[in-house]
Every structure is written in C-alpha cells, then in structure tokens.
Image (cartoon, rainbow, N blue to C red):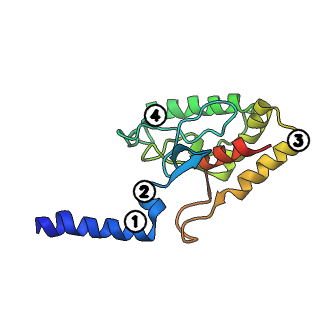
C-alpha cells in the first residue's frame, strides 16, 4: 500500500498533470523579459504609488506562514486594523472620507496570499497610479481599459466574484505607454 499510494499513485497523477496542464502543474510561473517574476497564483507585496496594491496579508505575503489572522468580526484589534487600513487607503488614493472602500482592501484573505482584488478595488487606485506615473488623460483611460480587460469572471460562471489579478495587472501596467 505504501508503494501504491505513496509512490506510484502520486507519480501517475503528477505525470497526468504535467501532460495535461504543464504550466499549472509547475506553479503557473510568469516570466517577463526572460526573468522569472513570480506566480500568478500568489499575491505579492506592492505598496508603492506606481503599482496597484493587493489585499492586505496577515502574513506579509510569507508563503511559509500562509494563513489568516484568525481575528473574529467582533475583535477590537480587527476593528482598529480595518480603520487604519481605511484611513491609509483614503489618504494614499486622495479619496473623500465618504468613499466606500471595498472590503477586499480592508480585510486580509484567508491564506494571506490572494493575488486578486475586486474591479472596484482596482478602479479606486487608477487616479493615484496615473498621477504617480505622470500619465496623460489618454494614458489614464488606457489604464482604466486595462483594468476592465483583465477582469476575470467567477469560476465556471457561478463560483466567486469578478476579480482582477494584481500581479498580472502590474506586469501589464509596466508595458503601458
């Protein structure tokens, strides 16, 4: 049983995955200009003004310690964290205090490594990025169209919400002229 389930079966399944889905079986790694930049499945920390910022991470995007904060919705510490994040987002993006900040920019994902944000979370960052990069109004419109182009639908049309992969968006952003 050890040989069958511990060696033969895993090798068989790995072989099928390598043949059927080689990119996914190898971690969905992304190269840009011949340089390995990361995996499209794992969020990366980007907190500069010239890039889209991902969801907060309870593990600071550490893949070894993947996990959530385990703070409950009634936690005073979570409430304070959310208020700090909200103030930071409003200030950084020069938004009105009345702006409704998307929840995915306020709460960390369960794994702490989620590469996606909602389209709304991406769109409230467009003005900041455009200003930081010195974009013209035309370039700002191209950036908005880029966000719209990279919106992913719910899986199989029913699981999850529309989302944008921040890592892939930032790679495309660097190509924007």
What percent of the width, then of the height, locates residue 166?
60, 46
Q: Which mark is residue 48?
A: none
| Disc nearest the viewer among 4 and 2 | 2
Label whose residue precedes the other's in the sequence (1 or 2) = 1
Q: Position of residue 73 (x, y in %)?
A: 45, 42
Q: Earlier in the sequence, mark 3 or mark 1?
A: 1
The label on residue 137 is: 3
Q: CA distance from mark 3 to mark 4?
A: 34 Å
The residue located at (56%, 39%) in the rendering is: 106
Q: Are marks 1 and 2 in contact (CB under 8 Å)?
A: yes
CB under 8 Å between discs 4 and 1: no
Q: Please tell me which of labels 4 and 1 falls first in the chain.
A: 1
Q: Which mark is residue 26?
A: 2
- Up the image or down, 111 lies above or below 16; here it is above
SS assignment at label 3 = helix
Real-space CA distance between mark 4 and mark 2, rounded to the nearest whole angstrom: 24 Å
Q: Quadrant of residue 157?
A: bottom right
User: Badge 2: few (under 14), some or many (20 or more) residues near its Cα, within 10 Å?
Assistant: few
Residue at the image point whose x is 43% and y is 47% from the top = 110
Nearer to me, 134 or 73: 134
Rendering coords of residue 172 (x, y %): 68, 48
Mark 4 — residue? 60
Q: Secondary structure at mark 2?
A: loop
Find disc 1 in the rendering and name its residue. 18
Q: Is residue 40 visible?
A: no
Could you tell me which quadrant the N terminus lies in?
bottom left
- Does residue 54 appear in the picture of this structure? yes
């Amino acid at each position: 049983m050890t040989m069958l389930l511990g060696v033969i079966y895993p090798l068989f399944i790995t072989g099928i995955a390598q043949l059927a889905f080689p990119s996914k079986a190898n971690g969905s790694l992304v190269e840009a200009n011949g340089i390995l930049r990361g995996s499209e499945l794992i969020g990366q920390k980007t907190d500069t003004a010239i890039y889209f910022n991902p969801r907060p991470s309870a593990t600071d995007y550490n893949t070894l310690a993947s996990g959530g904060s385990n703070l409950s919705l009634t936690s005073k510490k979570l409430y304070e964290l959310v208020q700090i994040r909200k103030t930071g987002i409003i200030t950084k993006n020069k938004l009105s205090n009345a702006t409704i900040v998307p929840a995915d920019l306020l709460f960390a994902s369960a794994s702490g490594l989620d590469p996606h944000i909602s389209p709304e979370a991406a769109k409230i960052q467009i003005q900041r990025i455009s200003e930081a990069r010195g974009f013209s109004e035309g370039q700002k419109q191209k950036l908005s169209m880029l966000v719209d182009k990279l919106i992913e639908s719910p899986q199989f049309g029913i699981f999850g919400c529309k989302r944008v992969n921040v890592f892939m968006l930032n790679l495309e952003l660097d190509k924007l002229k």
